[in-house]
Image (cartoon, rainbow, N blue to C red):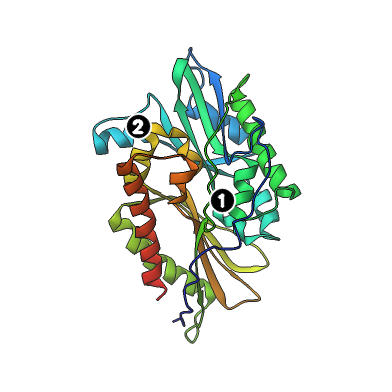
Amino acid sequence: MRKIAKILAGAFLALGMSVSVANASGEDQNLQIFSVANSNAKINAKSIEAAFNASGVTVDVNNDMNSIFSKRYGNVHHKQYNLAIFTNAALVKKLMDKYPTIGLITPLSMSIYSGKNNTINVSTLSLAGMSRITNIPSTDPDLIAYSKLVGEALHKALPNGEYLSVKHSQNTKDELVSEFALNIELDKGATYADFKEGFKKEFEAEISPVGFLVPKSYTMKHADYDFFDTYSIIRFNAIFPVSKNHPDAGAYAPFSLVMYKKKDEETMHIAFPSIDNWVEDLDITDEETITAVNETQTMIQEILEGLTE
């Protein structure tokens, strides 16, 4: 069905560039945490979802992780902890015109969690973080518009909120994205859509038994592509230990995986933001947690290597 090209290990693009964009809190950080006092508990995950939707940012999944964690692990780390994914289809399509790497953050993700002193917090990627992982210039007007839209949704969801000071260390890794590519050779009578669906079935069959779940997948329509699909993927055995001391990890999880083929190429591209970046991005020091993160990276990387060798 296909002729496999060699795996392109390393960076999806030259992602080691330095992005000097200040987020709304005035710091050059890859994620932002918006917070507000919530002693009366009027603001919750559902009200935040409604505010995002009303702002033109569609929340497709909004999961109560405490319900999941309590059943799986017998305890929870925070009074409230939700992971949600969201998109703006119009801006994603505009960015696809120029940068297929927008698939690396389609959908975007956020964590909604209770904090100290009866606050509620939402963690998302900042403009700097969106630019850094996709290699889309931070000056691109459509990326700026996307970041601005997220900011407007945050202010609508958390009235009178403010950005907290975020001082994570800067990740110095050059390889921020895990990327694979394979040449497509169709069987007689087959289409590129057939090829894609066959690959997706194989991929899903491999990731499910080892604990990966897909809260949502997207099929984007665009004239420049024969197909452009993205997955939102999560592994509870990674996010559960990470979220204990780093609830803001929801800016990175669930993570997005993109697979696409441009019409002027015979190559299918597959990429996802490397999960082991979390260790440096979030200043994780606990060895058990680091092991869970690295194990998750290795698992999905080896699955894709196995499917493309």
Query: Is disc 2 placed on a helix, strand or loop?
Result: helix
Q: Position of residue 103 (x, y in %)?
A: 57, 56
- Amino acid identity at mark 1: Ile
Q: Which mark is residue 66?
A: 2
Q: Position of residue 93 (x, y in %)?
A: 67, 55
Q: Residue at x 65, y 42 (%)?
A: 127
Quickly name the residue at label 1. 105
Q: Position of residue 218 (x, y in %)?
A: 52, 55
Q: Which mark is residue 56?
A: none
**Quarter that holds the N terminus:** bottom left
Report if residue 61 is visible in the image: no
Query: Is disc 1 placed on a helix, strand or loop?
Result: helix
- Amino acid identity at mark 2: Asn
Please say if 89 is above or below 39: below
**Quarter that holds the C terminus:** bottom left
What residue occupies the far left of the structure in this picture? 74
Report if residue 65 is visible in the image: yes
